[in-house]
Structures are given as C-alpha cells and as structure tokens.
Image (tube, helix red, strand yellow):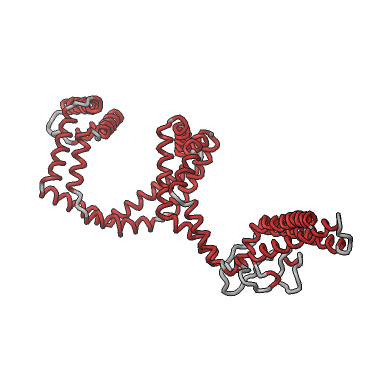
Amino acid sequence: MTEQSSTTGPQHASAEPTSPKPRTGAPATPAWSEVDEARRHSLGRMKLLALSLLLIAAVIYVATLQLDHGVLWGYVNTGAEAAMVGAMADWFAVTALFRHPMGIKIPHTAIVPTKKDEIAVNLQDFFTENFLTEAIARDRLSNARIGMRIGRWLQNSTNSRRAITEILRIGRAAVARVSDDEVRTLADDVLLPRLVREPVASVAGDLLDGVVRDGSHHALVDLLAGEIHTWLKANPKSFQAMVENRAPWWAPDAINTRVVNYAYDQAVAWAADVQHDPAHPTRQSLDDLLLRVAQDLQNDPGVQQRAESLKTRLLSHPQTSETAVSLWRSIRNSLLTAIDDDTSALWKRGQRALLELGDNLVADDELRDSLDGRLEDMSAFMVNTYGKELSSVISHTIQRWDGEEAAQRIELHVGRDLQFIRINGTVVGALVGLLIHAFSQLVG
C-alpha cells in the first residue's frame, strides 16, 4: 500500500517524496538534483504498480465474495484475500521504515527518522570494518594493477599530452600565487635568520672536502677554463690592452709588443691545456688549495670565526633579501613563460618524460612492482591512520540531516527496490492462500 501520513488512508498521489523545504536553524541537507527528481518519479511509478496489484486483489475478492466457493471461485476468493493480506503486511513493513503508517504513531515505526543517528553510526562502523581495512585496500590495489594501467595510459601521446597539460596548469597556478612579498617575508623572517643562527663553517668545509675528493667540481673547472679560452680567443685586443697598461713606461714599444703577444699566446695555450688536461698542474694546485680551505673550515677556529662573520654580514645585508626576491622573480617569469608556450622545451621534455615513464612501467616489472607496492603502503597508511576519520564523514553527514528529510533521501535511493517487497508480498500471499485453501479442501 502506498504511504501517506493522512489519517484518511493511503493514497498514491501524496506518497512521492517532495523536495525538502528549508527551515530556519535546521541542519543543511543536499539540494535535490535532476537525478533525484528522476528517482522520485521512478519510485512513484513503482508505488503505483504495487497499489494497483492490491486494488486488483481487492476487486477480485469483493467480486467473488458472494459466488459459490465450492470449487473454482473458492480458490480465487481465498487467493485474493491472502494477496490483500500479504500486500498490506508488506506495505506496513516498508512504510514503517520511513514514516508512521497513515500518521499513526505505532511503536517501532518511522525507524529511519527516529533512529537516524544510530543508523549513521552503524553505517559508519560497517563501512570501516568492511571497506577501510588494510587487507582490503592492499587486495583492491593489487588486483587493480595500477602501475600497468598508468603505463599503458601514458604510452598514448594524447594522454601524456593531457597529463603534462594538467600538471603544468596546476604548477602555473601554484607559481603565480606566490607573490614577491611572500618570498621576501619568507627570506627575512624564516630562511635568513635561521641561516645566521646556524653555524655553517664546518658543514661547508665537510661538503667542500667531499666535492673535491669526489671530483664533482671538475665540470665547473672545465666550464671556467673553456669560458676563459673562448674569451681570450675572441678578445685579443682587450687582453693586450690590459697587459700594455701594466708594462714599464721606459721599455721600448717593440719589446712591450713582443712581451704582450707572447703573454697572450701563453694565456690561450694555458686555458686550453687546463680545459683538456685533467692532470694539469693548475688543476692539482686548485685541488690542493680547496682541500686546505676545507680542512681549515673544519678544524681551524680562526678560519671558522672569519667564515661565520662573513656569512653573518652577507646574510644580514638588506640587499640579500632583495636579491632572493629578484632571483625568485626571474625564476617565476621564466617558468610562467615556458608553461604558457606549449612548444617550449619544458612542455616537450615533460611529455617525453611521461612517455618514457609509461614505456618503463609497461616493460620494467621491477619498477611497476615498486610503484604498486608504494601505492599499497600509502593506502595502508591512510586506512590505518585516518580510516576512522574518513568513515566518520558518513555519520557526521547523516546526523546533520533533519530526520524526515533523511528518510526522504534514503527512500529515494532504495525505495524503488523496496516496492518489489510489496509486489512479491501480493503475489506470494495469493499463492500461499491458494495452497492453504487447497489443503483445507483436502482435509475438510
């Protein structure tokens, strides 16, 4: 039977859930969407079908009530009667979930509105115990084979292009939101004061010692020697002018010219030798000098004190923070320019990197297993650490709803299927009535 809160009896037209009306001070409930309206009409049609079966059974019962019940009509009348009983019983059961049948406050009815908070907590516990567990999370991720899916997805150039587009779009928004004032504040209030307080001499010495012994600075020496050689080759007159300005005034011009030309040739040759000879004496001397500086920074209190004093003066200078802001401004502008230009090296390298990542994920089992394992570990950590907090969203959301509105919303999602209980009750009731009547005829 279709639900209705009126005491005049169940009617179909008023049984459809209506959109909740806002009430002052009432907890907020989600707005009704077009999908909700479609569900509401579908629920109404199912209720009409269930009601129609009840009415058909009632008509048949009344029509056969005065007929001879000896043979056929007895079965028909008894089946119709049992169908009405089954339909009414199941109508009461379904209605009692969401409201008081016909507005009568019968005990243990309107279960959803009156027990809403308890249902919310039970639903939260069910979700936590059956979904937010480490074993289930790991099993789902393992079966999903996310690493392989990501790899195959990224192998498609269209997808990798879309991915780099979204990554750079987010990156652009993040970079653009950082203002110069924020960088200046970070430098003045956090970074520079912290660096001033922290002793760095011994750390710098240890770092310098490791760099020299590992030969990590050789590339820088190659670059410097190459730049010096290039400048000398391109600016012989500038070099000659610098040397001539320091030549003795009393020396003959011819001798000065020969000395300057010789010095220029030696300087060019020296720069080339330093650039191409890893064992050049200049390189060895530079290494020895850097190692001595590293040792002094680590062990000599006087050198350490001078280094710390120099650091303090440098970091405390007002221009230092402005330099940091200028450096950030240059980096930001370069990044934004590269991001806005989809033909820039940043775009090409980013997409190429994603394509290579996709190929590696598909071909490299170890890499793929490593990614899947890390994702499983992350999901396990999230579930174990924040599982209860995540599932509490369910109970908190439902508890904020008004009881009647919560009942309407839940009925909207499950009510259509519950109408099959009413339909089945009508049909099964009729069949049971036929069996009971048949049994009565046999033993009567």
Picture quarter containing residue 35? bottom right
Front one among 167 and 286: 167
Mark count: 0
Horizontal and vertical percent for residue 136? 47, 47
Horizontal and vertical percent for residue 48? 76, 59
Identify which residue is drawn at 69% across, 73% down: 103
Identify which residue is drawn at 44% across, 57% down: 388
Q: Quadrant of the N terminus?
A: bottom right
Picture quarter containing residue 67? bottom right
Furthest residue in direction front, as rendered: 443
Front one among 92 and 35: 92
Residue 235 seen by the camera? no
Picture quarter containing residue 80? bottom right
Q: Quadrant of the C terminus?
A: bottom right
Horizontal and vertical percent for residue 307? 17, 49
137, above or below 6, in the image = above
Front one among 304 and 360: 360
281, above or below 75, in the image = above
Furthest residue in direction right, as rendered: 67
| Residue 302 as seen in the image, left or right of residue 350 | left
Front one among 247 and 230: 230
Residue 17 seen by the camera? yes
Horizontal and vertical percent for residue 42? 72, 56
